Amino acid sequence: MTKPRVTHRLDGATGGLLVVAKSAEAERNMKKNFMNRLCKKRYRAIVFGKVIQNQHKYSDLPVGEDDCDDDIYSGMGVINVALGGKDSITRYRVVKYTICDHPLAQGFITTVDLFPLTGRRHQLRRHLRLIGHPIWGDFRYAAYSKTDRISSKDSDNDLDCNCSEEDMRYKSSDKNPHSQMCLWALEISFPHPCKDETVHASIDEPLWYEELRAALSATNNKTVSA
């Protein structure tokens, strides 16, 4: 191998931690880690609406029966909705609520931590849309109006057009944090691909998350703790 290789993917509009292998052996072993679901990840999102942290609200599991034995997920809500005919499970924890007067918000936006137990394409974005809480700034899966879409070209196109995410141009978050998709990979742990140890890495949420919440709470003059 002549250069480092990424071992997993983030959506084009998603930011945060990405694992990069420095050798062919590390790349192979890391891909096995992901395939065998040995990598635990935490994302943070800001979503429309007031998410209720009910452990089985969005699951076909009988009450009291968990899909995962790991204690770190104890007490979390679960979204257990198949995608593309494949099992797809996302754990979630409410961080805070913020009053919001956007027409899609129905009074609130919610900051949530998300823990995907499976790795389907656009899983977190699709799961949140399916339960009625799409991600702020997700112009593919949230039903934004034409006037809400921030684009450098083709701004009059409908949101359900077949344009790719790469064709959707968003203004810099430094200029307009309201235009960014609020989904960020903040934490990951996994077995080291070449050593007998566990690797853990974490970062803080982007500064513009707080800018967005502050702007909305200033408009509405209220933030509510979870």
Image (spheres, helix red, strand yellow):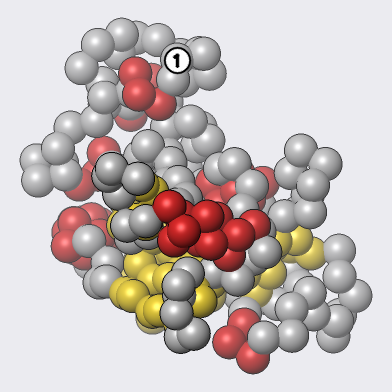
Note whether 98 is above or below 151 in the view shown: below
**Horizontal placement of 25 versus 211: left or right?**
right
Label total for image: 1
Where residue 135 sits: x, y (%)? Answer: 45, 48
- The answer to whether one can see residue 113 in this image is no
Residue drawn at the location 45% of the way across and 46% of the way down: 9
Q: Residue furthest bottom?
A: 71
Measured as percent of width and height from the top left, residue 98 is found at 35, 66
Q: Quadrant of residue 137?
A: top left
**Corner quadrant of residue 67:** bottom right
Q: Which of the image's four quarters has the C terminus?
A: bottom left
SS assignment at label 1: loop
Considering only vertical position in the picture, is 214 above or below 74?
above
Q: Foreground: 221 or 126?
A: 126
Residue at image mark 1: 163
Q: Residue at x 60, y 59 (%)?
A: 32
Quarter that holds the N terminus: top left
Residue at the (27%, 71%) spot, across then down: 203
Q: Position of residue 155 (x, y in %)?
A: 30, 13
Name, please, the residue furthest toward the right. 62
Q: Which residue lies at the image location 9% right of the left edge and 46% below the top edge?
A: 174
Q: Residues within 10 Å of mark 1 (few under 14, many from 20)?
A: few
Q: Position of residue 54 (x, y in %)?
A: 68, 76
Q: Please give left or right for residue 32 compared with residue 3 in the image.
A: right
The amino acid pointed to by label 1 is Cys
Q: Is residue 173 visible?
A: yes
Q: Is residue 204 above or below residue 83?
A: below
Residue 204 lies, with reference to residue 99, above or below; the image says: below
